[in-house]
Amino acid sequence: MKIVSWNINSVRFRLEIVERFLREAAPDILCLQETKVIDQDFPQEAFRRLGYKTIILHGQKMHHGVAILSRVPLAEDDRFDWQANREARHVGVKLANGVRLENVYVPAGGDVPDREVNAKFGQKLDFVERMTAWSASLDCPTILVGDFNIAPLESDVWNHKQLLNVVSHTPIEVDALNRLKDSNSWVDLGRHFYPAPARLHTWWSYRSPDWTVNDRGRRLDHMWATADVAAAATSHTVFEACRNWLKPSDHVPIMTEFDL
């Protein structure tokens, strides 16, 4: 079973490259973040034509939004409000084999890494804290995917020293993510297959005229699994070439294949 996670930064604006990716990579399940569309306007028919007939949505006008599209049966969907303000940032399902699949879009956190002067940063930390409380009580095999908006390791960013005070790589964010990881002994599948210090970027800013010249990337997108599911993982792929496609997202898809 191939499971993909991708922050698409508007599914309608980038539908052409999503369709191309699905034809080329043929995942069984696609988890999207930042779809930026209400459920009624989600382009479902385009996905159904490609065989993704099970479509689970949690959308929002113009902002945020998550979706799970599948060629295999899914059930028992849920939507957690880890932001505590009804933003559409999570959707989860249960696979036929009983494994949970949770798709999350963690807030970016603004520009200043200080919750006293930047409310968005505090909201981000609180979001991860709520996820941690949820994680600690998990009692079933689970895969957690999405745009975490945190690059935890020194090798997860293009320059550790220069980004220590930049939101997404600050020590307080890394500590919060590590607490989440430790709360249920999650396996970071990206680093399981590509141990640090291997380069493993998934995001490059739009601000750079040519992202390939200076390669200032960060690993903001993750796929984790509880130990029982991680044992069934057979490969992990970062589709870096998608960053050069027509009208690309600033994120690229990541995929883990499981023997489930």
Image (cartoon, rainbow, N blue to C red):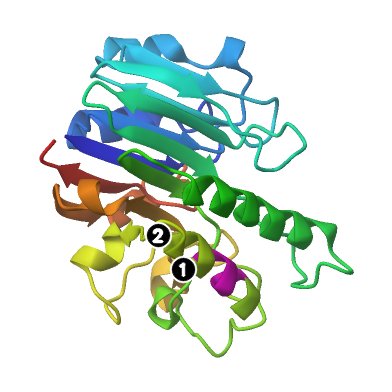
Q: Which numbered dot is residue 162?
A: none
In the image, which residues are magenta?
173-177
Left or right: where 94 falls relative to 15:
left
Residue found 58% across the figure and 50% down from its top = 133
Work out which quarter of the rendered image holds the N terminus and state it. Answer: top left
- Location of mark 1 (residue): 218
Q: Which numbered dot is residue 202?
A: 2
Q: Is residue 140 above or below residue 223?
A: above
Q: Nearer the viewer, residue 177 or 53?
A: 177
Work out which quarter of the rendered image holds the C terminus and state it. Answer: top left
From the top left corner, tell me how far across and down residue 171 is, in percent: 60, 79
Residue found 24% across the figure and 14% down from its top = 51
Give yes or no for residue 174 being in the magenta stretch: yes
Predominant SS of the magenta segment: helix
Element under label 1?
strand
Q: Is residue 181 visible?
A: yes
Residue found 38% across the figure and 51% down from its top = 252
